[in-house]
Amino acid sequence: MNEANELRNYLYDLQGYIVVEDVLSAEQVAALNALLDEHLPPIPDDWRERHGPRGPYDTYRFGVAGGSYESSPGFLAWGQPFVDLMDHPLSMEVMRSQLGDCFRLDRIFGMRMREGMPSGRLHADYGASEPFTRAEQGKFYPQPAFQALHGFGVAAFNLADSGPDTGGLCCIPGSHNSHFKLPRSIRDGEFQDVVIVPEAPAGSVTFFSEATTHGTLTWTAKHERRSLLYKYCASQLSWSRTRVTAPPHAELTERQQMLLAEPAGAHWFFPSLFDKTA
Ligand SMILES: O=C(O)CCC(=O)C(=O)O
């Protein structure tokens, strides 16, 4: 392994997130944005009144599939460039460092924000701060072995500049390894300095573990935020009963088909994604 990859994997494991810049060229970003323009109506001026049962998430998210949404191809159905990102070589390498050789694409959605759109709650889907653990505020939580912790990871492709000056994806570095539930005061925004918004220019990818406490900060930029989130998990895991399904007319490579396979035990019933390409 070369030194740059060694450093990237170390920092990702240490911080629970990492941004890699210049993954997509300006042309690729423009092509993806042009496809999104075809499928996304402009965010209406009365977006505040349009919040549904998921609050601001109903306005932020688009092209949803799997997880807490229905089974469907989501934004993968909007063109081959979205399908190609499923197994982007960098995502495959970073996810391999977190999830091992056998993993699935569990769910996807896009995020878009207009100036003034509000923050979303800090949360973690795994670890001490996951809502359904029995972790008590302020008490060390020795996580039982039957709960998943580091088995889920996200590749968020950034299609617009974002960072501390704009808001957007935020997180608490290192929180994926915390044995304490997120203190209420931090969740309620009293201690903003532990929450960071990584600098993530257009064309970059923000990788983060679903155990890392993360959320969305108010978008303050004039331009629209856009990112595409591909969420992967170790092959034996699944978050919900719904799936990302293959888009009807897309040509999927063998690896892409494997990424959409049903959950199953690594190597026993779910082959390595890297056997032929390693
Ligand atoms: O990209 C964001 O702003 C946050 C996304 C999020 O909340 C999530 O992945 O659960």
Image (cartoon, rainbow, N blue to C red):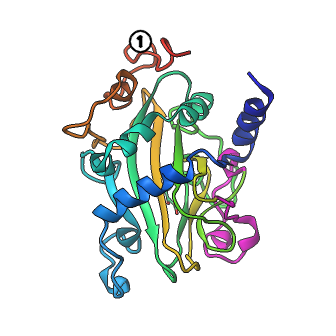
Can you name the residue that lies furthest to the front here?
A: 27
Q: Position of residue 119 (x, y in %)?
A: 53, 74
Q: Is residue 119 above or below residue 71?
A: below
Residue 195 among magenta residues:
yes
Quadrant in the picture for the C terminus = top right
Q: 208 or 203: which is nearer to us? A: 203
Does the image show residue 257? Answer: yes
Q: Residues within 10 Å of mark 1 (few under 14, many from 20)?
A: few
Q: What residue is drawn where x is 74% and y is 65%?
A: 194
Q: 54 or 164: which is nearer to us? A: 164
Q: What residue is drawn where x is 62% and y is 73%?
A: 166
Q: Quadrant of residue 139?
A: bottom right
Quadrant in the picture for the N terminus = top right
Q: What residue is drawn where x is 24% and y is 40%?
A: 247
Q: Is residue 242 above or below residue 111?
A: above
Range of magenta residues? 174-200
Residue 267 among magenta residues:
no
- How many labels were placed on the picture? 1
Q: Which residue is mark 1?
A: 268
Q: Position of residue 219 (x, y in %)?
A: 55, 76
SS state under label 1:
loop
Q: Quadrant of residue 262?
A: top left
Amino acid at dot 1: Trp
Does the image show residue 239? Answer: no
